[in-house]
Each structure stands twice: as structure tokens, then as C-alpha cells.
Amino acid sequence: MDYGKYKYELAKKEKEARKKQKVINVKEIRLTPVIEENDLRVKANRAIDFLKDEDKVKVSVRFRGRELGHTEAGKVVLLKFAELTSEYGVIEKQPRLEGRNMVMFLNPKN
């Protein structure tokens, strides 16, 4: 077999494989522990748009200053956010405190 023909066939197979693979993007939405109800709904609608586009959503709550002593408020906000987006996404990773941020990941429903 001709080596040039062999390399051509390999390149063709790789190109075909790249066409079929799905690229997953991670979009981030930032919240605060004292966010108002309407602001939360607006952010949730934005996350729903991302989930409809088959993107993962990283939802994070940033704590500043004394807010760090009330991390349970951030968890409540994240769970309420998950409830608002539950029709389009499921929780992949439960809310977890990472430094000054509490992070949760949402996957699109299939």
C-alpha cells in the first residue's frame, strides 16, 4: 500500500470523527447570597437559555466580608436557583464551598 494514500485515509477518518463529536461548553452565572427574587429569576432565565443550547452551567455564589459567616444563605439561593431551572436542567454537582465561592453545576436534561 502507498504510504501517502495511507496517511490520506487516516486524515480523512480523523476529520470524520471530529465532525461527529459534541463540544460541551461550560457557562458561568454568578450570584450573591442577598440576591432579590426578581434578579434570581432573570439569572435563571439566562441559565435556561444556556441549558436549551446543551451547555453546562456553573452557578457560583460569591461571599464577601461577613457574608462568609452565613454560607447557608448561599446554599439556599443555589437550591432555589436549581428549582427554578429544574424543568431544563439537573444538578450534576451539589453546592460546595470552594474558598470564598459556593459552586454548583447543572447539566441539561436530555
Image (cartoon, rainbow, N blue to C red):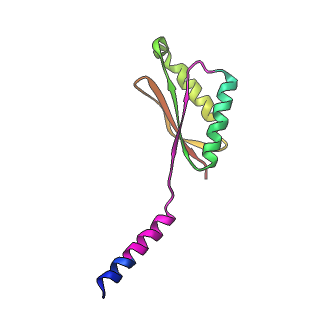
Query: Going by the image, does 48 lie left or right of 23?
Result: right
Q: Position of residue 20 (x, y in %)?
A: 51, 65
Judge by depth and name the residue closer to the eye, 69 or 11: 11
Q: Residue 33 in magenta?
A: yes
Residue farthest front in this picture:
4
Q: Position of residue 103 (x, y in %)?
A: 48, 31
In the image, which residues are magenta? Answer: 10-35
Judge by depth and name the residue closer to the eye, 87 or 32: 32
Report the residue at 43% width, 74% height from top. 12
Up the image or down, 64 lies above or below 103; here it is above
Report the residue at 51% width, 34% height from top. 104
Quarter holding the N terminus is bottom left
Quarter residue 90 falls in = top right
Report the residue at 61% width, 45% height from top. 51
Quarter residue 17 falls in = bottom left
Judge by depth and name the residue closer to the eye, 1 or 85: 1
Residue farthest right in this picture:
38
